[in-house]
Image (cartoon, grey):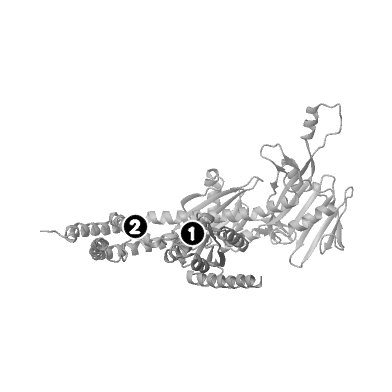
Amino acid sequence: MKISLHRTFLLPFLILMLSLAVMISWVLYRSGEQVTDAVTQKILESMSFRIQVQIERHLSSAHVILNAIAPENVETPDGQFRIPLTMPGDLRQIEERLWTATGLFPEINNLAYFAAEDGSFVSVKRLLADARVEVRYRQRGEKQSNVYSMAGPHQQMALLYSDQFDPKQRPWYKNAVQQARPCWSQVYIDFTLKEPLLTLSKPVTSAIQPPVNKSAKKSDANEQKNKIALTGVVATDLSLKQLSTFLQSMAMPQNGVAFLVEKSDELIATSLREIPYTRLDDVTLKRQTASESASGLMRFAAQHVKKNMLTLLKPGIPVIQKIKGEHELLQIAATQITDAAGLNWVAVVVVPRDSLSKETSSITVQSLILGLSMIFLMVVLGYATLRWTMGDIRKLTEAARSISSGEPFKGIDIHRDDEIGVLAESLQEMEKNLRIDTLTQLLNRETFIAQVEFRNRRASDTQERQFALLFLDLDYFKLINDTHGHEAGDKVLIEIGQRLMATIRKEDAAARFGGDEFAVYLHGVQDTLVVEQLCEKLRVALEAPIALGDGKVGHVGISIGVALHPRDGQDMDTLLRAADSRMFEEKKRRKAAADAH
């Protein structure tokens, strides 16, 4: 007596499904705390990373400004070839660079300046509020500097005021000269703008040219040549107000706080609506520390970081701790942010654990209820799964019977990764030849369209889905058929197919759509000029003479229609219609041109 596979697997399968449902319910019940920890960890890591990236992007604008004014020298890795990019000696030429540089990021870098070693000075300051630009000049040997209002480089200047400004006495100048590298100033509060600022300055040097002395030793000349002299210091001011704007715009867990401080605890930016300074009198602004914040949560977090976390911090790596606050458990993340110019800040994110555990606890309870409900449902689904598996086996049996009996093969609707799926794939390999054009060995129409749509679906959300679709039609093919016979026509089609495959790239695809019509898929191509070049390449290859046998030669022309995805359409039907229409227009133009000659 034959025993059905359905009965053989039914009881063990249902027991397995029931056990799995019970185990899942138990795990969900026991893992509530771990879920909260994992979710909190991911949230804090993600927020810390976003803050770090935003700060680095914000600070990079200052480096771009300085490199635009005083580019670094170009040098090969082995040091054998070096192109010095020196600062111009004329303040007017330097002024032009300052105009260009301050126009790159005017919202955050509206002031750039250059102080020469000889005491001369020039600066350009864009005042966005009233659309004015102030330019300050201090000529060599003069103690007084003049500030002008200007509309553009070398425009008519209006003198605003003069003062005794000595750039060489400024901290940014002294720091750059002393450290001999780009360096940041301390954060300070601009009294006029009422916002925190930071200054980046770097020394500008030039090589000392050795005097011409034929009697001097070569080694002495080389030693003299390697010496450098200070030309001056270039600097720019960077607004930090936008960092607070960014923190305030971040999606924050309920009652959470994010803030940015220096290691001295002085506040730079915060997600709260409070200013990072206090007013001592009418002319004096004092920076506020995080420990002086009106927010108790920020005060507690700042004190904890200062006492317990500073020694644990490493640049760019968040340190996350679970601590007991004044009234509740807290999750806190601190990240040290540094750069080569001496920056040393700490980004802090602190979140009450209850605001996250309530959400995860609710999810855990819902999951537990769902798991218990699934105990019964899994029994039903287990039985349905067994029937589905047996149904697939029946499909394989019917498919094998239809192939052996010579009946038309309708395909197998099985999508599995197990042995049944392997068997289904093997049977479907027999159907594969049906997808290839037997004459040209190119893809047929249906397979070509399916493959293009498959590639388009596989493209990730971050990868741009761009490609070009070419529709080709042979000109004068009917003449070859009528003159030399269908066998010669077949040779032409075979040769065209081979030339197509030899001309396109590995990632492209070609198909015969029927008769003398072909299609080509160009992966990742979107530029019109590139498409035109590829079309010309195809014409050259395909329109070359074709040997028909017995010393006879055939010639065909190629009319090509082009459609670009996604510019000309999102789906294959639209793209094919566009390419087909343009192919017919091209055929008409070519015929009209031929008739004209």
Please indicate, yes or no, whether residue 279 appears anywhere in the rendered image: no
Q: Label 2, secondary structure: give it.
A: helix
Amino acid at pointer 2? Glu
Q: Nearer the viewer, mark 1 or mark 2?
A: 1
The label number, if any, that marks residue 497 in the structure image: 1
Please indicate, yes or no, whether residue 493 appears anywhere in the rendered image: yes
Amino acid at pointer 1? Gly
Q: Nearer the viewer, residue 517 or 264?
A: 517
**At 53% across and 71% down in the image, what residue appears?**
580
* Label 1 neighbour load within 10 Å: few <14, some 14-19, many 20+: many
Q: Position of residue 270 (x, y in %)?
A: 59, 59
Q: Nearer the viewer, residue 387 or 432?
A: 432
Q: Nearer the viewer, residue 339 or 4?
A: 4
Q: Nearer the viewer, residue 544 or 124?
A: 544
* Label 2 neighbour load within 10 Å: few <14, some 14-19, many 20+: few
Q: Position of residue 404 (x, y in %)?
A: 25, 60
Task: Residue at the far front: name it.
Answer: 550
Q: Where is 434 relative to 348, above or below?
A: below
Q: Position of residue 84 (x, y in %)?
A: 76, 43
Q: Label 1, secondary structure: give it.
A: helix
Task: Residue at the far left: name it.
Answer: 1
Label 2: which residue?
429
